[in-house]
Image (cartoon, rainbow, N blue to C red):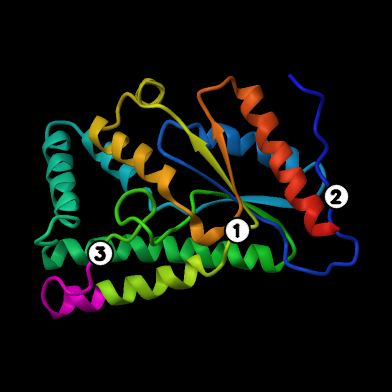
């Protein structure tokens, strides 16, 4: 492993917003492990919090699938309805309402993250919302505002307005953990292969509104991944202090 990379200390003048570092990647890319290690490292130099900005619908679905007897069938029904949200016909009214509620869950988490940042605390996020590609890779759940009845169209417009507001808060740095499918499915064997492949493909295409992005191959050993991530954070924060 390379020599230990020191985290730049916090500004002493209190000027400027606290750093916002986004950690993104598909399931199986190692976000949780890398995030926990980076959090401990950043806290050596300044107050830092890790904020999860996902909706966690996948975790809920997998938890339901483990219910006795009815779990697998109920989880399959939920997946089918969620997949229809991105189909040309779009979701039904009840499904659209549930999708909207989960999106608002993300919005609440985002507002909480901003409150932390306004207190001068650096923020490391697990995931970050985007409006470039609809669907499970932190994109819009109700992507086409012209589809469905008046309620679905209204919910879609409301969701888009909230997402536009969130992506307006551009991260100082995006650390993108790229992973191949074989590595990802080995790490997450309970995930649907088709969904995992889509996420792996989608995350590579995201630009996050032009925010600085550092791509890291997360199939590498953990110490190598951490070394590259720490260097990127150090260089970004050092440039802001200059």
| Magenta stretch encompasses residue 152 | yes
In depth, the one of 228 and 84 nearer the eye is 228
Instruction: Give the left or right position of residue 46, taking residue 136 as reference.
Output: right
Residue 37, picture quadrant: top right
Q: Residue at x 59, y 19 (%)?
A: 221
Residue 169, position as x, y percentages in the image: 56, 67
Give the number of callouts: 3
In depth, the one of 66 and 105 nearer the eye is 105
- Badge 1 element: loop
- Badge 3 element: loop
Q: Is residue 114 above or below residue 127?
A: below
Residue 142, position as x, y percentages in the image: 25, 64
Stretch of the chain drawn in magenta: 142-155
Residue hosting label 2:
9
Q: Residue at x 38, y 75 (%)?
A: 161
Residue hosting label 1:
171
Q: Residue at x 36, y 26 (%)?
A: 181
Q: Going from the N terminus, do you reach mark 2 or mark 3 first? A: 2
């Amino acid at each position: 492993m390379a020599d230990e990379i020191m985290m730049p200390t916090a500004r002493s003048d209190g000027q400027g917003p606290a750093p916002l570092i986004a950690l993104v990647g598909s399931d199986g890319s190692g976000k949780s492990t890398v995030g926990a290690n980076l959090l401990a490292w950043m806290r050596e130099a300044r107050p830092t919090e890790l904020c999860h900005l996902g909706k966690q619908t996948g975790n809920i679905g997998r938890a339901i699938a483990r219910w006795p007897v009815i779990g697998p069938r109920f989880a399959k029904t939920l997946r089918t309805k969620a997949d229809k949200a991105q189909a040309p016909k779009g979701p039904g009214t009840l499904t659209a309402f549930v999708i909207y509620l989960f999106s608002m869950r993300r919005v609440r988490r985002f507002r909480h993250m901003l409150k932390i940042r306004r207190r001068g605390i650096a923020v490391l996020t697990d995931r970050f919302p985007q409006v470039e590609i609809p669907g499970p890779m932190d994109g819009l759940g109700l992507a086409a505002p012209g589809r469905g009845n008046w309620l679905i169209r209204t919910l879609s417009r409301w969701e888009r307005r909230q997402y536009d507001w969130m992506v307006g808060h551009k991260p100082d740095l995006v650390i993108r953990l790229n992973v191949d499918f074989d590595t990802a499915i080995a790490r997450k064997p309970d995930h649907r292969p088709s969904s995992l492949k889509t996420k792996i493909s989608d995350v590579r295409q995201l630009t996050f509104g032009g925010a600085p992005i550092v791509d890291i191959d997360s199939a590498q050993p953990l110490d190598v991944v951490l070394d590259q991530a720490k260097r990127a954070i150090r260089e970004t924060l050092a440039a802001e202090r200059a």
